[in-house]
Amino acid sequence: MAKQVPKTKFPTAATVSYERELVKMVALVGKEALKLFDKHVANEIMHGDAVTFTNDSIFDGLKKMFQSLKKKANDTFSSSKKERAADQFVKNVNRVNRHNLEQQMKVKGINLVATEPWLKDFMQQHIKNNVGYIKNIEIEMYERIDQAVRDGVKNGASTKAIRKAIMEQTDISEGRAQFLAVDQAGSILGQMTAERHQRLGIEKFTWDTSGDERVRDSHRELDGKVFSYDGLPTINGRVVLPGEDYRCRCVALPMFEDE
């Protein structure tokens, strides 16, 4: 009886590690925003007059708060930290992908090549992309907190309400970080798998979902179906590999000629 080809594993550990690193950065900035609000703005609101937004002390407090917050965000999301997080993540996904293929090819008596000239550029591009995505999270978080605080002061909101708004914006950014980790893990894995499959002469694959309750109906309909890399399915108007749809955890199982 022929040995069964092992399933393609999703890089769950790499995803969780990346997600934690990004959420940690976001949480640090959110915590600092609350601290700076309490230090520079909250006391002025409690003791200010009815037109607090035009009060000089309030204006100065907001200026000091956001100058300090900008510095904290730049330090927390420094270029070296963004690059290190993205670099480690992409390398971890690659290790999982190569291990998947090594185990699957072993069943068929196929050895993966030791050197892959295409891989360096592929990984560098995805590292660069992820550094950009992290930067977007940083910028958007800072801008949303800035807007939330200024709107709260302008509209006469209580310090409690403004602090709540800061925490809500932090939660939104943490959600963005979590989305990014899963979305990029699936996309990078799917593209790596496709590249390696085709270089090994594998032109077809079986679509395999994660099999849990979070699988979308449009993906569940593809589960177990065979596709060629020249005839990929369309989901919500996009032609995609397994893993390329938004926050997709589906993977491709190699189809060999004798199957």
Image (cartoon, rainbow, N blue to C red):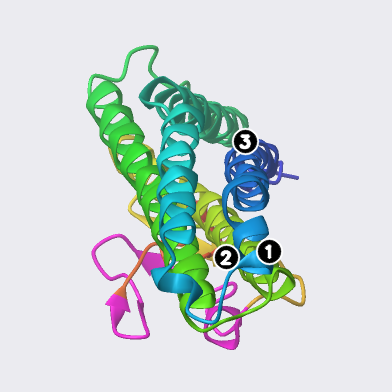
Which of these two is toward me, 232 or 150? Answer: 150
Q: Nearer the viewer, mark 1 or mark 2?
A: 2
Q: Nearer the viewer, mark 3 or mark 2?
A: 2
**Count of numbered circles in the view:** 3
* Residue 96 is inside the magenta segment: no
In this figure, which residue is indicated by the disc labeled 2?
A: 169
The span from disc 1 to disc 3 (Cα, nearest Å) is: 24 Å
Which of these two is toward me, 25 or 32? Answer: 32
Q: Quadrant of residue 125?
A: top left
Residue 90, given in percent of the width and then of the height, sits at 46, 32
Residue placed at 68% from the left, 64% from the top? 210
Sequence-wise, the earlier of marks 3 and 2 is 3
Callout 2: helix, strand or loop?
helix
Mark 3 crowd level (few <14, some 14–19, many ≥20, 10 Å Cα): some
Residue placed at 27% from the left, 70% from the top? 231
Sequence-wise, the earlier of marks 1 and 3 is 3
Q: Quadrant of residue 144?
A: bottom left
Dot 1 amino acid type: Ser
Dot 2 amino acid type: Gln
Sequence-wise, the earlier of marks 1 and 2 is 2
In this figure, which residue is indicated by the disc labeled 1?
A: 210
Residue 158, given in percent of the width and then of the height, sits at 68, 76
Callout 1: helix, strand or loop?
loop
Whether residue 209 can be seen here? no
203 w.r.t. 147: above or below: above
In this figure, which residue is indicated by the disc labeled 3?
A: 21
**Residue extending farthest top:** 114
The magenta-colored residue range is 216-238
**Image side of residue 217 versus residue 210, left or right:** left
* Residue 231 is inside the magenta segment: yes
